[in-house]
Image: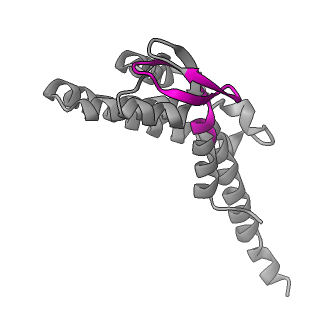
Amino acid sequence: MVLPLEAYLRLVKARRLMGSVRVLALRDLGRLPVDREWIEVRRGDEVSLPLWLALELSRRGYVELREGGLRDAELHRYHLLERGSKGGKLAEVREDVYLVAGLALGRLYREGSGESLVRADRMRSVLANLLDMRLGKLVNAVVSVGDRQPSEVTSVLEEMLLFKFLRRALEAWRSSVLGYAELWSR
């Protein structure tokens, strides 16, 4: 049984949220699950937490994420790399580029200042443009790469899934259209 693309994308999101991230405790947190064990986390401790927990604690002001997110400049660099990549090849980007871009956008929108909202809108526009360019190259890759594996085309898990689904849809379409010839032979 093949699940719809949305179900697979939810699994990818869940996988990303279960990933570990470094945080700095801004308050005493008590006992928390850290690296498969329960430890006492005090103010000033730097520990690894699952991303879902780190985000929730960060929203409440208990921790600060230590690992660098995506900055505007990095997203612009990816955009320029994508625009400059030749031969329909996808440029190398972070494997978690969509997650960190989304987190950065959310952070800017939550700040709520005029400057951060303008930066967020600009960043959202650059991200949308990057998505469009990468989607075009993925569609082209599905049509032209033959039997290459998704991991040979991109390192971004969400794009690998899309590649597989596009390939499956294209194969079904080709089979259906070529199947019209069978009508004549009857």
- Along the line of sight, which residue is nearer the eye, 53 or 98? 53
Residue shown at the point (70%, 48%) measured from the top left: 164
What colour scheme governs how the chains and residues are painted in the rendered image of this protein? one colour
- Along the line of sight, which residue is nearer the eye, 186 or 5? 5
Left or right of residue 126, residue 172 in this image: right
Q: Position of residue 169 (x, y in %)?
A: 67, 59
Residue 17: say if magenta. Answer: yes
Quadrant placement of the C terminus:
bottom right
- Along the line of sight, which residue is nearer the eye, 124 or 117? 117
Residue shown at the point (36%, 34%) measured from the top left: 60
- Is residue 93 shown to the viewer in this render? no
Q: Position of residue 133 (x, y in %)?
A: 47, 35
Q: Which residues are magenta?
A: 15-40
Residue furthest bottom in the image: 186
Q: Position of residue 121 (x, y in %)?
A: 26, 34
Residue shown at the point (65%, 31%) measured from the top left: 154
Residue shown at the point (69%, 41%) measured from the top left: 144
- Is residue 117 shown to the viewer in this render? yes
Left or right of residue 141, residue 104 in this image: left
Residue furthest right in the image: 185
Q: Position of residue 79 (x, y in %)?
A: 43, 24
Quadrant placement of the N terminus:
bottom right
Q: Quadrant of residue 20?
A: top right
Residue 60: say if magenta. Answer: no
Left or right of residue 62, residue 39 in this image: right
